[in-house]
Amino acid sequence: MSIPESILIAVSLCADCFAVSLCSGVSIKKVRGKDIAAQALAFAIIQTGFLLAGWGIGEAVMGLLGKLARILGILLLGYVSVSMIMEGIKGDGQSRDLRGWRNIIISGIATSIDALSVGASLSFTGSTFAGIVPLLISLFAVTALSVVAGIAGGHRIGKAAGRWAVLGGGIILAIIALNILFEFV
């Protein structure tokens, strides 16, 4: 796999990481560099790990795994989006963000299900570990950068729009979850 192909796949796989980070960033009251770095690193590790796990699992269990992965993705995104919508409606300042490890891991897994599928499909095509290394490196870097950009951009939007931005972010995540559901059905 070429480096340009790896970067394009990485960008497409981390679009949902960017969306979740952007939506979450609207609720962050104070942006701290170490928090953003930890969140970006966690998302990048989870996303890259899921790609590698998918590649390792391969063709043998992909049919069952694909269905379960989509259901899991729908449930996790649904949970995060409903929580954000409720917090936006309440407007009590208790917004969900990515600073808790539980929230980071749930969001990281929810946004990495597609990487698992891509990894498995790469194994179907006979890609070797050496062949997917450029993609693993690209995915790690692009995911980390997208989370940093999403949180920073979302924070700016949140300062300007307040609880309405949190409500909007939750609605966007709900739309993403519904999109996955309709593709599944």
Image (tube, rainbow, N blue to C red):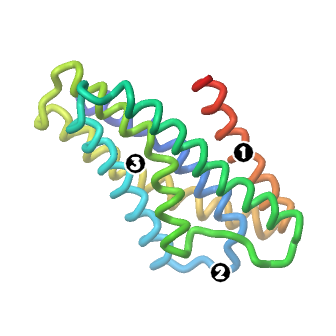
Give the residue type at disc 2.
Lys
Q: Name the residue nearer the viewer: 180 or 135.
A: 180
- The residues tagged by marks 2 and 3 sit, at their Cα atoms, a distance apart of 24 Å
Label 3 packing within 10 angstroms: few (<14), some (14-19), many (20+): many
> Between disc 1 and disc 2, whose residue precedes?
2
Task: Give the image location of residue 24, x and y in percent.
Answer: 65, 62
Q: Residue 90, labelled with which disc?
A: none
Residue occupied by mark 1:
174
Q: Would residue 60 appear left or right of 37 to someone viewing this image?
A: left
Q: Residue 142, labelled with which disc?
A: 3
Q: Name the residue nearer the viewer: 38 or 102.
A: 102
Residue occupied by mark 2:
30
Say if 43 sits above or below 64 in the image: below
Residue in the picture at 74% in, 55% down: 82
- The residues tagged by marks 1 and 3 sit, at their Cα atoms, a distance apart of 24 Å
Give the residue type at disc 1.
Ala
Q: Would residue 50 appear left or right of 177 to someone viewing this image?
A: left
Q: Assign a secondary structure to mark 2.
A: loop
Q: Would residue 96 appear left or right of 5 to someone viewing this image?
A: right
- The residues tagged by marks 1 and 2 sit, at their Cα atoms, a distance apart of 25 Å
Q: Quadrant of residue 88?
A: bottom right
